Structures are given as C-alpha cells and as structure tokens.
Image (cartoon, helix red, strand yellow):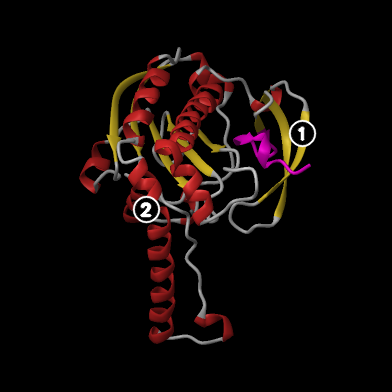
C-alpha cells in the first residue's frame, strides 16, 4: 500500500483509511514503538477482524492464458474460470475436515484468548473491543478516533494441506490514523501433518481423523502462539526488538506456497523440542514447528 505522502486531498486520505480499517494491504515491514510512547497509558478502541468462518486451503490466483502474450476479456474470463475450478476442487478436498470439525468456532476461540490478552496489558487500557468478520463502513470510519488498534487475522491450510497457518497483523494508532505508531505480524506454522510426506487428500484425511483431533490441537496452539507474540511485541510494554536477547539463528524451510527452500534469519526468542519462536531480521515474529526445519 502506498504511503500517505503519495496521495493528495481529503478524498484520497479517506480511501487510505478505508483500506487500512477494512483489512486491505498493509505496510509489510515491522515498525517498533518509539520508547517515549511507552511512558504513558492509553484508552484504546480495538477492531479484531476475522473474515473466515471456516478454514480453507490457500489458493493463489494465477494467470494462465496471458503467459504467452494473450490479453483481452476472453483470456481474463478463461483465467477466472480456471481459478474458480481450482477453488472448487480445494473446497471438495477439504470437505472431510470441515465435517469433522463442524463444531469448531475459530472466532470464538480466538476472541476468548484475545480478551484475556488485551485486558492484561499494563499500558493499553481497552475502551471497546469490536469483533467483526468485515471492516468498518465509511460512516463508522468517520467516528474512529485514536488511540486505535487494528487486528486482522487469518487461518488456512497450505496449498498441499500439510501445514496450518494462523496469522495476525497488528497496527496501533496512538495519535494519528494516517500513520501507525506500530505495525507487526505474528505468524504460526504448525508442524507438518503425518510422518511420510502426506499431502492433499492424504493430509486432509489425517487432519480429519479422530474427530479432527490434530486440527483442533494445532488450531488451539496457533491461537495461543498468536497471543504470546502479540503480548511479547505490543501488549506487555515491549522493549525495542534491537535490544532483545536471543541467540542468532539461520534455518531453511520449504515454502508453503512455492515449494522452494527459503532461509529464515533472526534471533531465537523461545525454543523447545517441538517449536521455535523467531524474531526474523525484518522484525516480525514467527512461531515454527521444528518438523518444518530442514537443516
């Protein structure tokens, strides 16, 4: 998303606010709080947005017909038809898990844990918590005043269904809704389901087995890990990440989306035999199942 300086006029400012508050694209780089801001307490309104009611398989929208230079409405429609078919196939593939976990309510679980975390903050005093599946309307945006905390949360299976991802993006506006004083991303990756590289339908079978016990366990863990990272990075009067203690770490994992090997560098915040929490070099936090690490 373009920075505010790229825009001119009140209308474009309103469009920017609309994008921010309805969960559109956001600045990717971590932004730490200025130390002087932590010398005060704030009465904060919180918007927690969770669009999805049920877990889904991540499907990247791809272009097929335009690769060879084709363009025009016909080719766009063909691309849409192919992507729609891929989405439909993913819906059918995940249906056994949805049936086995029909009584699971991610939003309720997440918001129960979020309330505990928010109301335990020593410096952010929660004035109101809005729990939503959609963002604010333009009329509601006009009523928003800082301090304001925006939380956008998603959960989904990797394209091959081996790994569950739970991610929260947090933006805190203490003085000006045009400019966040803090931005951070907290991402949980479960361990891979299965021991023999099971993927797609086979992986879904494992997630759904025994009344979806593995899925329920990973979802609960993912929510708790998101709350841990939210408290660490924002709610518990955090120190500057540059001053954080932790051993340096460099690990390689296989990308959930491209399938390629990627390297993660940063420092270890917390580690046990099954999981490691990493402050990656850009500043954001990752909680990774050790079974994902390939070296």
Q: In which quarter of the image is the C terminus?
A: top right
- The residue under label 2 is 95
**Image position, residue 59 (x, y; %):** 47, 60
Vertical placement of residue 194 versus 113, above or below = below
Q: Which of 26 and 52 is in front in this view?
A: 52
What residue sits 51% from the left and 43% below the top? 164
What residue sits 53% from the left and 50% below the top? 203
Q: Distance between the residues labelled 2 and 1?
A: 38 Å
Q: In the drawing, what numbered circle is on residue 33? A: none
**Image position, residue 113 (x, y; %):** 39, 23
Q: Is mark 2 on a helix, strand or loop?
A: helix
**Image position, residue 97 (x, y; %):** 40, 46
Q: Is residue 22 in view from this perspective? A: no
Q: Single out the residue that lies furthest toward the left.
A: 139
- The residue under label 1 is 249
Asked whether 49 falls inside the magenta stretch, the response is: no
Range of residues picked out in magenta: 279-295
């Amino acid at each position: 998303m373009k920075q505010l300086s790229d825009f001119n006029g009140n209308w474009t400012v309103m469009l920017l606010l609309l994008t921010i508050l309805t969960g559109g694209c956001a600045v990717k780089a971590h932004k730490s709080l200025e130390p002087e801001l932590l010398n005060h307490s704030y009465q904060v309104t919180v918007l927690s947005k969770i669009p999805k009611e049920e877990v889904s398989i991540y499907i990247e929208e791809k272009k097929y017909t335009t690769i060879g230079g084709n363009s025009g409405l016909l080719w766009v429609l063909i691309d849409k038809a192919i992507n729609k078919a891929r989405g439909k196939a993913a819906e059918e593939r995940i249906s056994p898990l949805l049936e086995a976990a029909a009584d699971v309510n991610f939003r309720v679980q997440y918001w129960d844990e979020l309330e505990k975390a928010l109301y335990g903050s020593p410096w952010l005093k929660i004035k109101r918590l809005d729990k939503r599946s959609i963002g604010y309307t333009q009329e509601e945006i006009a009523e928003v005043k800082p301090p304001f905390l925006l939380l956008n949360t998603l959960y989904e299976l990797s394209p091959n269904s081996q790994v569950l991802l739970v991610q929260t993006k947090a933006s805190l506006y203490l003085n000006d809704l045009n400019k966040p004083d803090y931005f951070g991303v907290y991402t949980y990756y479960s361990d891979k389901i299965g021991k023999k590289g099971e993927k797609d339908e086979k992986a879904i079978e494992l997630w759904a087995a025994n009344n979806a016990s593995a899925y329920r366990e990973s979802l609960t863990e993912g929510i708790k890990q998101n709350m841990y990272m939210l408290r660490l990075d924002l709610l518990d009067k955090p120190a500057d990440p540059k001053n954080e203690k932790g051993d340096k770490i460099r690990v390689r994992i296989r990308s959930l989306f491209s399938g390629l090997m990627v390297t993660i560098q940063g420092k270890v915040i917390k580690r046990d035999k099954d999981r490691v929490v990493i402050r990656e070099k850009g500043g954001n936090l990752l909680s990774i199942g050790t079974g994902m690490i390939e070296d």
